[in-house]
Image: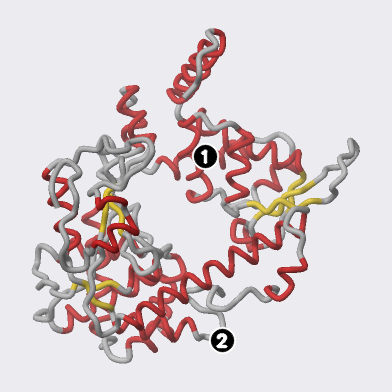
Amino acid sequence: MGENNTVLSEGGYITSEMRRIVNKDGFFIKQNFKNEEKSVASNIQVDTINYLNKQKFRINKELLEFLLLEFNNEEESIIFKNKNKLHPLTDSLNKLDGHKGKDADLKKEILSHNSLYYLYRNVLELGLTFKDIPFYLPTFMDFRGRVYSYVHYLSYQGVDVAQSLFEFAEGCILNDTNIDVVYHYFANLAGKKRLTINNKIKWAKSFCSDHSARGTVKEKVSYILENEDIRNLVKISSEPALLISVYFSLIKHMTDASQTYHTPILFDASCNGMQHLSALFSDIELGKLSNVIANDEDIPGDVYTEISNSVKDTISNLTEDLLRDKFKRINITRNLMKRPVMTIPYNVSLNSMQEQLVSDGFFIKVYESLIPHKEHNIYSYTVNPELVINNDILKLNSSEMGKLSSILYFSVFKRIPSLQVFKKYLDDLVNVLLKLEKPII
């Protein structure tokens, strides 16, 4: 590859046919109408792509065996969570009207469910295909300079199941220093992100040492399925297959430290809008909450949890008893608050935020009638049972949903006052442009 977006040279798995299919003229940076033939790549970017493209991978056979057993599990799968089979109402899909109320919601649910089923099946089929074949993943940069793989299913940028199947073909030997990175990663996957780095390492080392001493390296699959400690970790992990993959690798290392370590470590190095805003506004408190500034107690800040606690306080102080008791049945989790906290700095409206929460599956919009009527609601909202204490059924009418959304929305501004200043600036800027009849881009 050459710099300044020059044409890729042919070799290995890079062929002229592939270049024509995935990127016209074989340019180093994938073209977009916003940057057509204007991208310039530095030597560092070229070296990055060359380095990534020459990494040889292999399939983690132990994980593949485990995942195949889970996918064929007739009972509920601990990994696939009922997405290892088609939706039970798939046969009625063609009879549903995708444009009306309840039919539209059900059709969306079926299609979403089946989409994940086919995705998982494709990943596992590719895993079987490459089980005994080393392979490479070709990558490219988009016009913003972000790196992506050309491969969509079996990719280290894919879903949890796909990522867990990857191993470096060459690997390395773990020592007293680099093993701490693996411990840190394992703790993150196990839901220990709120601990300090040192405490993450201590927890992971203790957990793995305890299970290694029990001789759990034998009969790995049956142990994962039967051991309560591991099952509990898998249940709370957002990336359960990766958790199991790293766990196996650590246990094998503790059994025999001379074994080569092959499991990739994946850390998300992205930052959020709150971190940018804390720097722009010189907001010390927000800087600590978003980890731009280290906290005195050496405990990572968590802006999402902080604002979720603020929401809980607001709900507890509601004067309307019935509404307060109803809202207190909802688990105001860190995950629930993530979308509002991430999008409000981009000046998202209250209504748009509410629709995003519905789209994300936290609330299910149920159409009661297709005909507007001033005396009753057109639709209601069912809270996702996973978000309700004791997994009960909880419904909110339109007015209640509006009040809850307002609490979520304005709690962000209440906890981060500088954000209100920023929103006012954006609103005033829009008003000026409208008066000048200038376009807003």
- At numbered mark 1, what does the secondary structure look like: helix, strand or loop? helix
Nearest the eye: 152 or 231:
152
What residue is at 68 percent from the left and 54 percent from the top?
364
- At numbered mark 2, what does the secondary structure look like: helix, strand or loop? loop
Query: Residue 177 occupies which quadrant of the picture?
Result: bottom left
Residue 388: image location, x then y, percent? 63, 57
Give the residue type at disc 2. Glu
Q: Can I make out residue 209 in this image? A: no
Query: Residue 434 occupies which quadrant of the picture?
Result: top right
Nearest the eye: 296 or 293:
293
Nearest the eye: 82 or 52:
52
What residue is at 32 percent from the left and 35 percent from the top?
288
Q: Earlier in the sequence, mark 1 or mark 2?
A: 2
Here the colouring is secondary structure
Q: What distance separates the C-alpha of mark 1 from that of mark 2? A: 38 Å
Tell me if label 1 and label 2 are in contact, CB under 8 Å: no
Residue 223: image location, x then y, percent? 37, 86
245 relative position to 344: left or right: left
133 relative position to 377: left or right: left
Give the residue type at disc 1. Pro
On residue 340, which mark appears? 1
Above or below 102: residue 218 = below
What residue is at 58 percent from the left and 31 percent from the top?
349
Label 2: few (<14), some (14–19) or many (≥20) C-alpha neighbours in 10 Å? few
Residue 132: image location, x then y, percent? 25, 85
Above or below 20: residue 244 = below
Above or below 52: residue 220 = below
Q: Can I make out residue 54 in this image? A: yes
Label 1: few (<14), some (14–19) or many (≥20) C-alpha neighbours in 10 Å? many
Residue 82: image location, x then y, percent? 56, 75
For label 2, the residue is 74
Query: Residue 56 occupies which quadrant of the picture?
Result: bottom left
